[in-house]
Image (spheres, coloured by chain):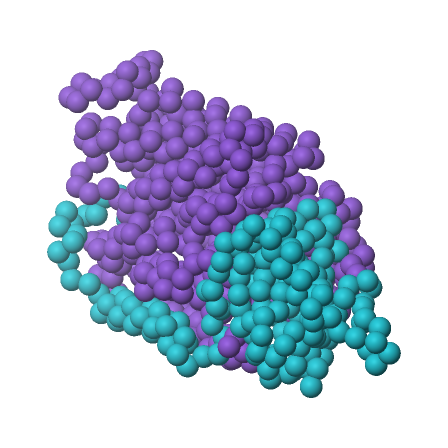
Chain colours: A cyan, B purple
Amino acid sequence: MAITPPSNRLWWKEPVHGIELGWIIIAFLWGLFMFFFMIAWHFIGNQNLSTETYKIQPERYVEKVEAFADEYRAFDENGEPIEEDGVPVVRPPVGGDAYILARLWEFWPILELKKDESYRIHLSSADWQHGFSLQPTNINISVHPEYEHVLTLTPTEAGVFGIVCNEFCGIGHHTMTGRIRVVE
Amino acid sequence: MTTIDHGAVAGAAVAANYRTCRFSGLRIEANAETLIKVNAVAAVVFLALGGLMGLGVALTRWPAIQLLPADWFYLVLTGHGANVLLFWIIFFEIAVLYFASAVILGARLATPRFAWLAFVLMLVGAVMANYAVLRGDSTVMFTSYPPMQASQWFYLSLIIFAVGALIGVFVFFGTLVVAKAENTYNGSVPLVTFGAITAGIIAVFTLAAGAIILIPTWFWSLGLISNIDSLMYKVIWWGMGHSTQQINVSAHVSIWYAIGAMVVGARPLSEKVSRMAFFMYILFLQLASAHHILAEPGMSASWKIVNTSYMMYLAVMGSMIHGLTVPGAIEAAQRRNGYTRGAFEWLRKAPWGNPAFSGFFLSLVMFGFIGGITGVILGTEQLNVLMHNTLYVPGHFHGTVVAGTTLAFMAMTYLVVPLIFQRDIIMPGLAKLQPFLFGIGAGGISLFMMGAGTLGVPRRHWDMSLTDAPFVHEFPAAAYLMMGLNGISAILAALGGILFIVIVVGSILAGPKLNVPGAKLIFPLHDKSREAVSEYGSEGTLKLPGTIILVAIFFACFVLYYFVNWKYLSELWLFN
């Protein structure tokens, strides 16, 4: 029994039952498959999270985001800056760098991206850890202070997308949201 | 006879006070018995506290109810994590380690004074943690990610608890040495003890990782250290946070084997295979910290792939092996007990009326199908981005830790009460229902949270309707339905939990005494005299058709669900 010592003292010399051996082989091969499939996806797949990361002081990152927002601010036909709820809408250059700042409790600013165009999106936090959760596409990435994470993203659909914070960041956590617009 | 605890001196027999259990034939020493009792009781108390907090969390996340205000919700959620994930589980695990060493090997507990010290430290730590959380200045969640800071009491309490647990683990190792030195058993240790050793070794690694990160974090909260790197904290903290869950896996798999042995007379199909599967845990489960770093900046893809896969999934292979050998051992035993018709008579006629068996089998099935499969999906490098920090994550670990570990520990308690406390189970009719009530509730919690997570609902979040947020994202109606069903499941699980506490506490205090002549168990153990003589589970019963069908269904679900998720992933925005 499992609660008594093995009745055969030389239990390690016993042959393994065919059913068990078969299952061990299946489990081992399936494990190998899953392992190599992760590697393969780096070559065949389009959803591999970038590992490009820089150390940065949070204040320095805030300055960079503000400079970016000033430079690429969106204006309407009357020359008025476009805002939503006081947050500026920014149109980063196609293929260029776009910055998102996570801080207590907002994602700033609102990016307006073009569908099927690629952007280098920079993500970092000014204070605590936050979670960048893009909905409803469901892309979820952690945001750390002092680490500037550069992702390359190509939106494949147009519309208004919500960013919801999904890393607990204090009492205002459930009010921390943001927005990304994707236009044709 | 009194107990002298001068430690084991080779050759010199130390006087100890033993009794022999009339039902199991196990030789039980007085100190071991007392320490198993106190640890098990403490475990149940923290389960009650943490479980109640969990109900508060689930009812708050039910949008139609939203029971608690936001600040209380986050506070209670912090307490829920610490009480059930750490205190209930680890107190019970220490009891399991003492059981698997002293009781199963028929030895005395080594250094009972140190075992008491361990218990007191753990108790002080657990109470202090609750104090720190209830003060209101340590609402940092169980994970306490910096730069968010808790009060110094929070970190100190976890350190004290971990030191206590570590001492308990060394008492367990000491007991193994005592048993060997005093020749209380012949040959190799039993499989259950081997599994417990696995749990003990993993516990040492794990608690060490906890100390490495929590001690500097404590200094930081005192102002002695200026900065804790948030990414480094996460990597090391999860060396404790995730790996403690691997102690649970080793412990509850050992319990599965133990309950199978005690209730239906199951024997391992092969000692070698089951032990090798446990050995895989020792070698590779430590890498699991990476599961929490897959969506982080700063770590390379190759680091992520090697670590998240437990080195080519060799630890997953260990679990998959147990997934065959545990039901296989039950099937072989039941066929030996005479249930040989068809593929599933052995399962239909299993002792489902015995809560130890039903709890164990539900735990086995749900751990595999719900907790296990989703764990691999969540831990796949690229797939993680679909669910990281959504409710899918708590959905997954309620499948492993609640439906798997907690249910297995509850099942084991139905054996510990009669064998160690020598009191029989009261209210047997309700006790029969309890594992089903709790199991269905826990399974529901797990599935519905994963459903909501797949729809993007964040974890640790007070208000999915985002009422007070500047930019509202409307989650689909299905997500609201999922959260309602999650609430209902949580009520079921809570009822099962309350029933468990009432039955166990009532049995310990007022159950029929079993240390009187002629007493019989309400839920009988396996009757050895009625079984055919054979050496091993597989002997004479080379056919295990029922188990093969179950395992084939499991594998089909696994493969299908794996590829469904890759399909979802391929439809995301392009990361290039």
Query: Does residue A69 sit above or below B460 in this rendering?
Result: below
- Can residue B268 be seen here? The reply is no
Residue B75, given in percent of the width and then of the height, sits at: 68, 41
Residue at (50, 65) in percent of width and height: B384
Residue at (19, 28) in percent of width and height: B181
Query: Does residue A84 sit above or below B9 in this rendering?
Result: below
Residue B461, given in percent of the width and then of the height, sits at: 68, 54
Looking at this view, is B325 or B518 the one in front?
B325
Q: Is residue B73 left or right of residue B284?
A: right
Residue at (75, 56) in percent of width and height: A175
In the rendered view of the protein, which quadrant contains the N terminus of chain B?
Answer: top left
Residue B471, given in percent of the width and then of the height, sits at: 77, 64
Looking at this view, is B86 or B338 the one in front?
B86
Q: How many marks?
A: 0
Query: Does residue A52 sit above or below B130 in this rendering?
Result: below
Q: Quadrant of residue B573?
A: bottom right
In the image as oriented, which residue stretches furthest toward the right? A78
Residue at (61, 79) in percent of width and height: A94
Q: In this view, does B432 lie to the left or right of A177?
A: left
Looking at this view, is A144 or B455 the one in front?
A144
- Can residue A101 be seen here? The reply is yes
Residue B236, given in percent of the width and then of the height, sits at: 43, 46
Query: Does residue B162 sit above or below B328 in this rendering?
Result: above
Q: In this view, does B283 lie to the left or right of B344?
A: left
